[in-house]
Amino acid sequence: MDASGAADARQGHPISSDVWEKREMREALAAREISAVYRNLRKEGISQRQIAALTGQSQSEVSEILKGRQVMAYDVLARIADGLGVPRGYMGLAYDEATEIQVVGAADEQQAEEDESVKRRNFLAHAAQVTMGAAVFGSSPQAWGASPARTPAPGHIGMTDVRQVEAATRALRALDYQYGGGFCRDAVVAQLSWGQQMLDSSATSVVKSRLYVALADLHSLAGWTSFDTGLMDSARGHFANALELAKQGDNNPLVANILYRMGRVYLHQEAPNDALKLFQLGQIAAQEAGSELAIAVLAANQAWAYAMMENEDQALKLLGLAKDEFARANLAEAEDWVKFFNETDVYAMIGTVHTVLARNVDLRHTKYAIPALTRAVDAYGEDMQRSKTFNLGALATNHLLEGDIDHGARVGRAALEAAEGLKSARIKDRMTPLKEEAEKRKNNPDARELAERLGLFFAA
């Protein structure tokens, strides 16, 4: 929609755009205090019924929010912003038109009508060309979004400037692990805009090479946090840019890591065949780098893909490879972006693969999933709250599958409590198997209560 069309659309909106410019409203929006936003709207003469109609919520939901119930889910915040006519940038959602153009060159809008399978194929082609220098999956004419808007670049940069980018990336990644991508994605994108400008600065070849790697890692984090907030096209664009920069920096371990992360996006989209292709490309880069830890990460995720494809033999074979390569890896000398894959994550992946096999192939896999997931849950600290939540959900699912409904319900409630405060769109997707298994057993009061609580969680 062009500017005149947008203006015409606003003229028919019951809420004047001037409302959003008032100081107390801007403060409430910036803090994402939706209860304060709704109270301010009531002062403007907007009824609860109108708010409900515009946001797609029930009047009872609006009433609860007015009484102070917090709204945390990114997709709900975005729906509220769009329905009320709030520029998304006012709520720090970084997805209004102006911000979107700065961040990803309006790539999401340009690609919105493409079939998802076509997008996946285009990315595979791009990944193959970058990784192997050959069009393995067909041509890749895709443009992966314009560079972020830049402030004036410094004339010359040194290693200290690059270290600042690396330090910021480490700090932001820690926030992502603890609170979810929705908490820090905007900050990642802002840091990326600052870091990207350095590509135009003069520097020694050593500094320039390290800058390529630092920005590749930051783009990878931007892709991951975009994925975690449900912005798939933005994720794809950032990962594509990350691949190119990592290749320019001649860093094969990072190339492997980026391909692993994009493969995880496709697992999330239930496209294990496409995910497997990316994991296989990642294995090539990991083998070239001689990184046992990177090989272990890719093998574990290949096992997950095979489990989703109900190929039990291959899933177990790759899981075994992952464990063997991890045992051989020198963790002290591993690259920073692979160090997340520690013993706890190995147990988490073992539990995840066996959970998928238990649901899709053979119920007996619960006897392998439960002890592995239990060890992972016990080992995760508050700094890995999202991963702990994922694994609690999977553990509860296995207990329900085994028929231990009382214990499964308790663990399920713990998963919901752990999810509180997380800003991750993936939580609901990873909780879906638990919700399905609880609903199958609603004749049991514990399962019924869990199903009801999950229903409320999914509706929020």
Image (cartoon, rainbow, N blue to C red):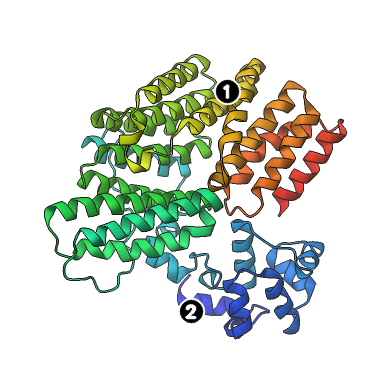
Q: Position of residue 409 (x, y in %)?
A: 77, 35
For the point 60% across and 35% down, the residue is 377
Dividing the picture into quadrants, the one containing residue 442 is top right
> Gap between marks 1 and 2, in whole Å?
55 Å
Foreground label between 1 and 2: 1
Q: Nearer the viewer, residue 391 or 458?
A: 391
> In the figure, is residue 300 to the left or right of 383?
left
Q: Secondary structure at mark 1?
A: helix
- Label annotation for residue 28: none
Q: Quadrant of the image for the C terminus? A: bottom right
Position of residue 30 measured from the top left corner of the image (x, y, whole percent): 57, 73
Across and down, in percent, residue 448 comes to 83, 37
Count the labels in the image: 2
Horizontal side of 296 relative to 380 (left or right) equals left
> Amino acid type of disc 1?
His
Residue tagged 2: 4
**In the displayed image of the protein, which residue is found farthest to the left?**
204
Q: Earlier in the sequence, mark 1 or mark 2?
A: 2
* Residue assigned mark 1: 354
Given contact means CB atoms under 8 Å apart, are the residues at marks 1 and 2 in contact? no
Mark 1 is surrounded, within 10 Å at the Cα level, by few (under 14), some (14 to 19) or many (20 or more) other residues, namely many
Q: Is residue 347 above or below residue 201?
A: above
Residue at x-position 72% and y-position 24%: 401
Does 41 sit above or below residue 148? below
Residue at the image position 32 percent from the left and 61 percent from the top: 146
- Image coordinates of residue 415 in percent, x first then y, are 68, 41
Q: Residue visible at 26% across and 49% down? A: 213
Residue 215 in view in this figure: yes
